Amino acid sequence: MPNGEVFWPDKEGFQAYGGVDNAFEGFHSWPLFYLMGGDKKFLALAQRQFDVITEQFSRYKRKSSDFEDGSGRETMLVKEYLPDMDWMHQGESALYFYFLNLADPGNKKNKERSIRFASFFNNEDEDIPEYNYDYENKVFKTAHIGSNGPMFSQYDKPYKHGTWMDFYGLAFYNVPGVETMMDLKNPEKAKRYGEVYSARLKNCDTVTNLLSTSMMVNAYMHTGDEKYKQWVLDYVGGWRDRYKANDGMMPDNAGPNGIVGETIDGKWYGGHYGWTFPHGFYFIGDAMVIGGENERLLTGEKNKLTWVREQVKLLMSKSIEDDNGTILVPQKYADPDSLIEYKGSKAEHMTSTNTVSGYEGFTKKIQIDGWYEFTPLNPVHMAHVYLDSFDDHDMGILRETRDKNNNTWECVSDSAVSAKFLGGQNHAYTNFLDGHYDDYPVDALKHSINQVYKQLKKLHGELHSSDTPWGYPPGSEKQWQELREVTQQVNAKKKNKWSESVTHSYFQTYLIYRSTITTEALIHLTMGGLMPIYNGGLLLVSVRYFDPEENRPGLPDDVAALVSYVKEDEIGLEMINLHPSKPRRVIVQAGAFGEHDFTKISYRSGDEHGVISVNDRWFQIELGAGCGINFEIGLSRYTNQPSYIEPIDRV
């Protein structure tokens, strides 16, 4: 809509086909692009969109709510925040908020929000119906938490089939009469499964709640208040204790007394967004990386990501190889000898099309000692480990586990891209850092430019009635009828007409897959770091920049930068002022949050060269018109407490 609101049909109780988190996700690249040097309009638009979407969804009532007393807690956002969602989804939407705070930490409204949002999870919100967190046992009371407190009622209902489940299977394979998710179309079986699901998970924390630690670090960087830091260290510490006590296997659940398997028959698997359902290791790996990175940021201590390496190596010990020698690592675990069938392809490894259920498109997953879904290892987690440790052993794991059927190591490839943030070139970038892909900077920039044109082409097509992939399509005639009505209403509000698939996709994912701003190459090449973990990680890089003339973050106009290499204690930085007649001043900061210190700088510009001692988190340089300079910059990593303090005075 012209004022920035999401198109919304005039249909009572309409809640779209995806969560409110999706409405925020499509904008995370806007403040990120600004803070790297993008036009000021991107910050203004990013802030407007956050404010507008927050206000809009704070008006809409939920289809069903525990709060029908006019308390204001029955809306899709409560106190401007998600009222009852798991942290896998909260983390996705929070990425946008974290970038907004980093881009403009002086924004008083966002600082107040940061403190308020953190208060929902450290029990400081005095109005919350019930506290979310148990300080004594270092657990959240359930997986679905937010500004309305622990939402136990999410579990007090039948567990019905949804088309989104078809690709992931079940959380439990030992419920009598429920062999596949299709059985949940039967009301009686859905009721029975829901009772088991509730008994096991209603009062159970999940390891993916480690993603919440970034929200606390965000509040800490605004205030410097030690209570936020201590909360992070205590909560991550609780999971570290459980990890150590479980023979090096990260458990995915902890009961109300902090005990693994307390509500799941003593099992370390079966938790929400855990080893069995829906994605297995991927989000557990995300949680371990984010928890470890936040510990490193707050304490400066090394080896906080060692547990990620250990977990990867444990999975590698369970792996098999395909015919070309690619290591296939199991992603999921369930009770050995379970009947596990859901949608898949004939190309999948360790599967059979001879299913018991006989459903079209289903494959039977073959287990080895309980492990299943054998695939090449996604490099994202080990890339974060390597950029923390700079250990050759971690680079060796990245090389050993690469997919030999798909070369993402020596080229920038579309097949490596995660469409949610147009990034994923972890193999190519780490190969560049290892000195084996000299053309990566040029290839990455070309690829980014191509991504922009592809996204524009996609948007143009959707605005002129082309179809788009369905994602999770409607699962009943009632849902199809609603989609037809919604499509008619939305098309009546605008000039261009959408197809039903575009309407469904829009109200499921909004602008998530439609962004035309791509930032991964800029983070790699100008900042010397990786994209944050998408589900709520913080930006951890070697350097960032400020423009003292404009009093804003980012590279000044006409200034180009390339971080040519990254080591534990040193980076290479090349900077050029492309303006033919005007000099440019640049402030360089050590780390996204000033968490590092520069030690010394060796520089070379033409015939000039020298060494300067710095021992500070900032230095300033003036680049003459048309001039460039090469730096070798010594870094002392994680020597300062992270902060939103900036080296400029905003006007």
Image (cartoon, rainbow, N blue to C red):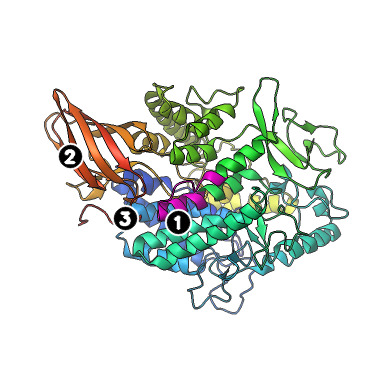
Marks 3, 2: nearer the viewer: 2
Horizontal and vertical percent for residue 98? 42, 54
Judge the density around disc 1: few (<14), some (14-19), many (≥20) Cα neighbours within 10 Å.
Answer: some
> Cβ–Cβ below 8 Å for labels 2 and 1?
no
Marks 3, 1: nearer the viewer: 3
Kindly identify the residue that appears in the image at 52 percent across and 54 percent down: 91
Amino acid type assigned to the residue bearing label 3 in the image: Asp
Judge the density around disc 3: few (<14), some (14-19), many (≥20) Cα neighbours within 10 Å.
Answer: many
Residue indicated by mark 3: 104
| Magenta stretch contains residue 291 | yes
- Image-based side of 185 in relation to 394, left or right: right
Amino acid type assigned to the residue bearing label 2 in the image: Ile
Kindly identify the residue that appears in the image at 56 percent across and 44 percent down: 308
- Image-based side of 429 in relation to 396, left or right: left
Residue indicated by mark 1: 5
Which residues are the magenta region? Answer: 290-307
Label 2's element?
Answer: strand
